[in-house]
Image: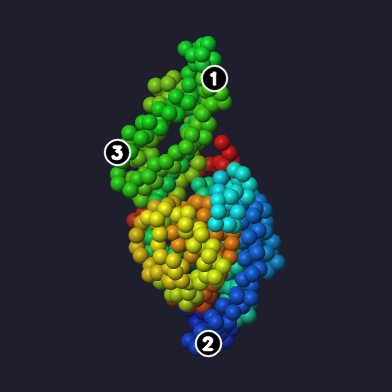
Amino acid sequence: MPDRRSKAPGVLIRATLALMVAGLIQIPSAAGAADDRADLLRRMDQQADRFGAISRQIWEFAEVGYNENQSSERLKLELRSEGFEIQEDVAGIPTAFVASWGRGKPVIAILGEYDALPGLSQEDTPVEKARVAGGAGHGCGHNLFGAASAFAAVAVRHYLEEKKLPGTIRFYGCPAEEGGGGKIYMARAGAFSDCDVALAWHPGTRNQASLSSSLANITAKFRFYGKAAHAAGAPDQGRSALDAVMLMNLATELLREHVPALTRIHYIITQGGGAPNVVPGVAETFYYARHPDMAALDLIWARILKCAEAAALATETRMEMELINSVYNLLPNEALTALLDRNLKRVGGVRYSPEEQKFAEALRSTFPPEVMPSMGSQEEVETPRADLGSGSTDVADVSWVVPTAQFTTATFVPGTPGHSWQATAAAGGSIGRKGMVVAAKTLALSAVELLTMPAEVDSARRVFEKRIAGSVYRSRLPAGQKPPLNYRQN
């Protein structure tokens, strides 16, 4: 990977000053900049319904990771119509792409996602009702994520063209964030190697720029191969792969007492046999393990692997491990977070109409009372806090490659549990789309500042270099491993 630190600090500043002297670009006054921002936001208001409709289409597609064919094509169609150059099949992933507009430095990346979650199909109503029985749904709001980021990229593209400014705006179509690690493979392929800054956001229940880190994560499927036999007629001839799965899971349960604080381990049995009267010859369990520090997680994972090996030994079965994904902990960037916070506060929060208020109250009646922040909190913008998030994201791996920051907006009703049918319901309706517009405007304003104020890019770079000093980013995915395009299949 090329060393992006080779350029001396201040190169962008000197280049911009030279262009100013030559009269090739104009840097507006403070008053002019304020007018430009207001004009940008007004134009985005005029396009909000268009991108809201795109978010609804992606919500209806509800495609899981690495299968987001219609969703990615819909976004590419929109960006291509706006003059973006599209690089497809990035990192050998059919649903990954990069859309670029402009020339030269700085290069500002806006990340977008569009994968849904299995089993969370839901109508856009406050009553639990699946659109497709057993189907996928956008319980994490990635339909909004992708549409808002594309919306912002288009708005910035028009700003650059009208002001005749140098610089490049890019939309990164990132598949399979939910456990598939799409961005890791994109980073490995060099997709972010010439970026100066990466911006992201995420649907949520509050409006807040993030100073938080996240949990590093390793995920894998453990398959056990035994010997099938008649469970009643010849049980002594069988070697149960399901017994191995159950024994591994029991050993991991006992391990929980003896791992560092903040460790999270969770699993499901994805294959347990075909019939009760047949000793299962094949069984599988799917594991996630998380910790705030990747080095500590390596040690925890080695112990989980021993649980699997011991289970195979005890049951006389054979074990194979398929490493599915591994993401790092996210590196906050104080300079970029301050920029996002400033612009999020300029845009403001989400106000509900009377109909939306009624929907929100009905939805909140389905929540446990202990997770009930006050109604109205969606109208406020909260101050960034430096804490530790409980989730994991492949945005974190991008943050080890290029200065990165993100924020959340209130696309969900206050109190909504993540990855829930209630989140899916809001993500498909007007409440989700209002939060989406807040996100798009915040991204656009922030990208414009980065493109017109080289000192902001410089500040982000200095914070990034201080964060990674003495550290080496090394993905735990083997160098030759290809994206697990079928990871959602058992």
Q: How many marks?
A: 3
Return the x and y of residue 413 as percentages of the image width and height.
49, 62
Nearer the camera: disc 2 or disc 3: 3
Residue 109, position as x, y percentages in the image: 54, 64
User: Which residue is under mark 1?
Assistant: 278
Question: Which residue appears at 60% of the width and 54% of the height?
Answer: 123
Which amino acid, by three-letter code, is at mark 2?
Gly
- Disc 1 element: strand
Label 2 – label 1 distance at C-alpha: 76 Å
Estimate how packed mark 1 is, as few (under 14), some (14 to 19) or many (20 or more) residues with alpha carbons within 10 Å. some
Quickly name the residue at label 2. Answer: 32
Residue at x 60% of width, y 75% of height? 45
Q: Is residue 112 above or below residue 247?
A: below
Crowding near the residue tagged with mark 3, few <14, some 14–19, many ≥20 C-alpha atoms within 10 Å = few
Residue 324 screen position, x and y as percent:
50, 41
Residue type, label 3: Glu
Q: Which residue lies under the disc numbered 3?
A: 257
